[in-house]
Amino acid sequence: MRKLLGFVGATIGGGIGWWAGAPVGTMTAFMVSMVGTGAGMYAGWRLSDRLGE
């Protein structure tokens, strides 16, 4: 379950990051998306830990 929640969090975080950075430019969207991916993965792992999985 930890890997699944990490994947879902990374996908959502990356999408939000891309959406936030896209108005500035493609490279900015990419960089913000990478930060969002990491943050989403971390949030998914934390959620898994809190659920006791």
Image (spheres, rainbow, N blue to C red):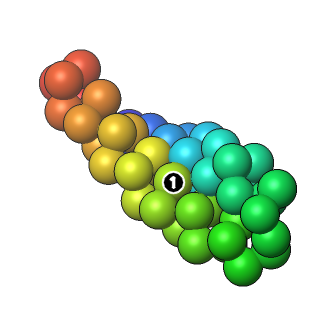
Residue 24 x %, y %: 77, 63
Residue 3 in view, yes or no: no
Above-or-below relation of 24 to 50: below
Q: Is residue 50 left or right of residue 47?
A: left
Q: How crowded is the residue under tag 1: few (<14 C-alpha within 10 Å), some, or many (20+)?
A: many
Question: In the image shown, does 1 or 21 lie closer to the viewer?
Answer: 21
Q: Which residue is nearer to you in this view: 36 or 8?
A: 36
Which quadrant of the figure contains the N terminus? top left
Residue at the image point whose x is 61% and y is 61% from the top: 33
Q: Which residue sits at x=24%, y=20%?
A: 51
The amino acid marked with disc number 1 is: Gly
Residue occupying the far bottom of the picture: 27
Quadrant in which residue 2 is drawn: top left
For label 1, the SS is helix
Residue 3 location in percent, x, y?
Answer: 40, 50
Q: Would residue 40 be seen by someone viewing this image from the given angle? A: yes
Q: Residue at x 39, y 50 (%)?
A: 39
Q: Give left or right: position of 34 versus 29.
A: left
* Whether residue 12 is situated above or below residue 39 in the rendered picture: above
Position of 32 relative to 50 (above/below): below
- Is residue 14 left or right of 39 when viewed as pictured? right
Q: Looking at the picture, how far across and down is residue 37, in whole percent?
A: 51, 57
Write down the residue under mark 1: 36
Quadrant the C terminus occupies:
top left
